[in-house]
Amino acid sequence: MRPNRLILSTMLVLSATAAQAGTVKLSFLDEQTAVRGTSEMLLAGGCRPAAVSALKLAIARHDLSPPGFDRAKFPRQVRGFYSFRSISNLLEALPHRLCDSAHPFEFNCFDTVILLGKDLIQVKPQPDAITGPFLPAFTWTNNLTYRDVRATARDAFALSYPSWYIDATKPIMGSIANETRVCLVAAFYCWHALPSASSDESRSATLMRVLGRDWERQGVAFPTNMEVVLCHDIAPGATEVLTSHAGLLFHTSDNYSYIEKAGGSGPFVRLDFKDMVDLRCWLAWEVNGGPNAMPDHRLFVTFNNERIELLTTRQK
């Protein structure tokens, strides 16, 4: 499956100037009015009723524990949403990246996308076929993400997802065929091997070709009524890129709605905005923001298999 189009962006700087695109609304889906409204939006966007019901179960489970981060700088919540004058105001209110919240590790970002993409994100269910090499990602207790090499999607899935996580998420992911989940996790939560590139622009084009080749080899077909948002991180001098985060983007009549789970420990998030600059700034912060940011890393975001953009953050 080849990309239909390729948009190479200029480097985006996370600054007040870049982020004055307009009002941004944020919900952690921890209030029933916001959950109901988001469920209606997801159904209107093509998500299956079983998937939306399962998402509400995951949200309810997450809300059983305290949120794990301070909202002291947030404005007053109205019907489950916080309204900010700009994305820069929102980011300034966050005490840290949401994925670093002090909350039990539960449902993750990749399973959220796979769940809501039920029947819409297609993959050839061949978990035991030798379609590798796969470069599955996995995390140790030091919070560093490593990779290994596996020949099949099932072996890659088993390395990325420990058995306790599979058991804990089984009630939520029950509407997704296990073979589908195995193959999509292996395709999305992984590393990709890159040839060397001389510039960020050529690296963008090369990365899009590599991703498209790997997704085609694994039989992935993206939806048409929503966009799968995947974030990719390349360390300096590396010839491998890690796909580290995932979300879903919906375009309504007059704005965008972005849905994600902020890692395994962070909250569920709905971000409503009118300018894509806001989402780029949000993703740059969520993937590589805060006091532990690594400004020498290169961050990329892909939207389905159609376009790629380069993101950077600059600390104020």
Image (spheres, grey):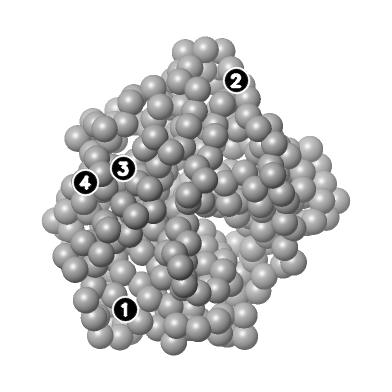
Secondary structure category for the residue under label 1? strand
Secondary structure category for the residue under label 4? helix
236 or 111, which is in the foreground?
111
Q: Are marks 2 and 3 in contact (CB under 8 Å)?
A: no
- Of the two numbered discs 4 and 2 in the rendering, the one whose residue sits closer to the viewer: 4
Q: Is residue 181 visible?
A: yes
- Residue for point 48% across, 17% down: 126
Q: Are marks 4 and 2 in contact (CB under 8 Å)?
A: no
CA distance separating discs 1 and 3: 27 Å
Q: Residue furthest top?
A: 129
- Of the two numbered discs 4 and 1 in the rendering, the one whose residue sits closer to the viewer: 4
Q: Position of residue 218 (x, y in %)?
A: 57, 26
CA distance separating discs 2 and 3: 31 Å
290 or 166, which is in the foreground?
166
Q: Residue furthest right?
A: 198
Q: Is residue 153 left or right of residue 118?
A: right
Residue 143, above or below 286: above
Mark 4 sits on what residue?
A: 53
Mark 3 sits on what residue?
A: 48
| Disc number placed over residue 82 in the picture, else none | 1
Q: Is residue 144 left or right of residue 9?
A: left
CA distance separating discs 1 and 2: 44 Å
Which amino acid, mark 1? Tyr
Which amino acid, mark 4? Ser
Residue 111, above or below 86: above
Is the residue marked by circle 3 packed among few (<14), some (14-19), or many (20+) residues within 10 Å? some
276 or 164, which is in the foreground?
276
Which callout, 4 or 3, points at the residue further toward the start of the chain? 3
Mark 2 sits on what residue?
A: 132
Residue 235, above or below 219: below
Which amino acid, mark 3? Arg
Secondary structure category for the residue under label 2? loop
